[in-house]
Image (tube, rainbow, N blue to C red):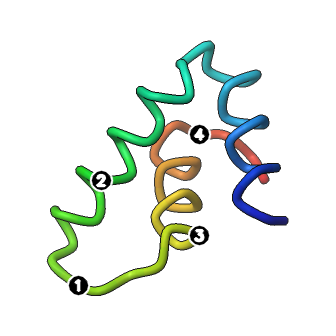
């Protein structure tokens, strides 16, 4: 699953906007204080929001 697919799935499952999801990704990357990819951050957000991938 690529980032575009993840975004669409998160939007449909949560009702959040694309901008809100990207903000969450940036916050997650900051929380982890590691150099993680956007894909990993999106997957973590999906897990946090209980969205099955």
Distance Cα–Cα, label 1 vs label 4: 23 Å
Q: In the image, what residue occupies the spot 33% across and 39% down? A: 23
Q: Which residue is mark 4?
A: 50
- Image vertical order of residue 10 relative to residue 43, above or below: above
Give me the C-alpha separation between circle 3 and circle 2. 12 Å
Residue located 73% across and 49% down the image: 6
Q: Which residue does the numbered mark 2 point to in the structure image?
A: 26
Above or below residue 7? Residue 34 is below
Which badge, 3 or 2, comes first in the chain's sequence? Answer: 2
Mark toward the start of the polypeptide (1 vs 4): 1
Which circle marks residue 34 in the picture?
1
Answer with left or right where residue 53 lies relative to residue 19.
Answer: right
Characterize the local packing of mark 1: few (<14), some (14-19) or many (20 or more) Cα atoms within 10 angstroms: few
Mark 2, residues whose alpha carbon is within 10 Å: few (<14), some, or many (≥20)?
A: some
Of labels 2 and 4, earlier in sequence is 2
**Residue, disc 3:** 39
* Residue 46 appears left or right of 23: right
From the top left corner, tell me how far across and down residue 21 is, in percent: 47, 35
Label 1 and label 3: CA atoms lie apart by: 14 Å
Residue closest to the far top = 15
> Mark 4 or mark 3, which is nearer to you?
3
Mark 3 Cα within 10 Å, few/some/many (few <14, many 20+)?
some
**Above or below 21: residue 48:** below
Q: Are marks 3 and 2 in contact (CB under 8 Å)?
A: no
Distance between mark 1 and mark 2 Cα atoms: 12 Å
Mark 1 or mark 3: name the one nearer the start of the chain. Answer: 1
Of pointers 4 and 3, the one earlier in the residue sequence: 3
State the image coordinates of residue 11 (x, y, percent, origin top left): 67, 25
Secondary element type, mark 4? loop
Label 2, label 4: how far apart the Cα atoms are: 18 Å
Q: Are marks 1 and 4 in contact (CB under 8 Å)?
A: no
């Amino acid at each position: 699953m690529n980032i575009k697919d993840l975004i669409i799935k998160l939007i449909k499952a949560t009702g959040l906007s694309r901008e809100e999801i990207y903000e969450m990704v940036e916050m997650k990357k900051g929380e982890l204080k590691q150099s993680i990819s956007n894909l990993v951050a999106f997957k973590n957000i999906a897990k946090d929001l209980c969205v099955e991938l």
